[in-house]
Amino acid sequence: MPAIEVLHLQKNYGDIIAVDQLSFEVPRGKTYALLGGNGAGKTTTLSMLLGLLLPTSGTIRILGIDMIRDRFKALPRMNFTSPYVDIPHRLTVEENLRVYGGLYGVRHVKRRISDLAEEYQLSPFLKRRYGSLSQGQKTRVSLAKSLLNEPEVLLMDEPTAALDPYTADQVRTALKAYQARTEATILLASHNMREVERLCDNILMMKQGRIVDQGSPVELIGRYGEQNLEDVFIQIAKGSELPR
């Protein structure tokens, strides 16, 4: 059974089609990417997978659970991170992590926070209010929050945005180690092509709410006759046809 199964997913806003008959599967223990330009439907898709948006039509199953009917059975086994989704500013980092740990029913939450603080270099500002942090520090806190419950399925929107290259590399290394240890499934949306090449087993290329191509980074680079994934992205964004 795939960890994520999406079938004929549709989201309309009046006459605007944000996601158009989307179908894909993500096997357990794999990392897949949703790639596409702004407005391609990536964030809308992630929001529907989380149950934050109701689809106009279609089916979503995560860990075999119907997310439209029974999402509360799946949510404790999932988590999500995005630097564009804020958490309470007045609470300290530690207070925020304790609150989210309680919501997810994390056992030994104090020890879990300590482990994540060491792994993501949060210790120097655990006692500081979240609102006082830099954007890069907030991104690291958001990542730690998303791993509190050791999710089986992790959804990520621009996971290393605002991080300097060194810290971003450390975060990717930690994510790969987490996945190797837990066999978690990761679905991420990113504009960082180097990140996608390093982390992802397979890529779903989106345009105007549809998947227009898919394959591993190596397969896509070879298929389009390019040197790197960024050039493939540009070709697809410009609407170029596959070379014959």
Image: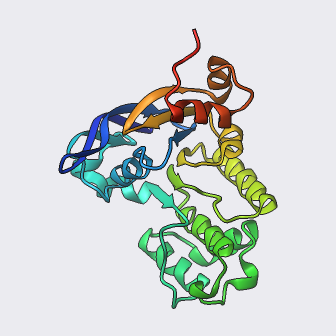
Q: Quadrant of residue 4?
A: top left
Q: Residue 192 or 216: which is nearer the viewer? A: 192
The correct choice, above or below, for 223 with respect to 1 in the image is above
- Is residue 1 visible to us here? no
* x 74%, y 66%: residue: 119
* Quadrant for the C terminus in the image: top right
* x 65%, y 30%: residue: 217
- Is residue 183 visible to us here? yes
The correct choice, above or below, for 145 with respect to 150 in the image is below
Q: Residue 91 or 53: which is nearer the viewer? A: 53
> Going by the image, does 115 lie left or right of 75?
right
> Going by the image, does 70 lie left or right of 43?
left
Q: Position of residue 202 (x, y in %)?
A: 58, 31
* x 57%, y 37%: residue: 30
* x 32%, y 59%: residue: 52
Q: Position of residue 135 (x, y in %)?
A: 64, 74
Q: Position of residue 6 (x, y in %)?
A: 35, 36
Q: Position of residue 181 (x, y in %)?
A: 67, 47
* Quadrant for the N terminus in the image: top left
Q: How many marks?
A: 0
Residue farthest right in this picture: 166
- Tell me how the rendering is colored: rainbow
Q: Residue 180 or 211: which is nearer the viewer? A: 211
Residue farthest left in this picture: 14
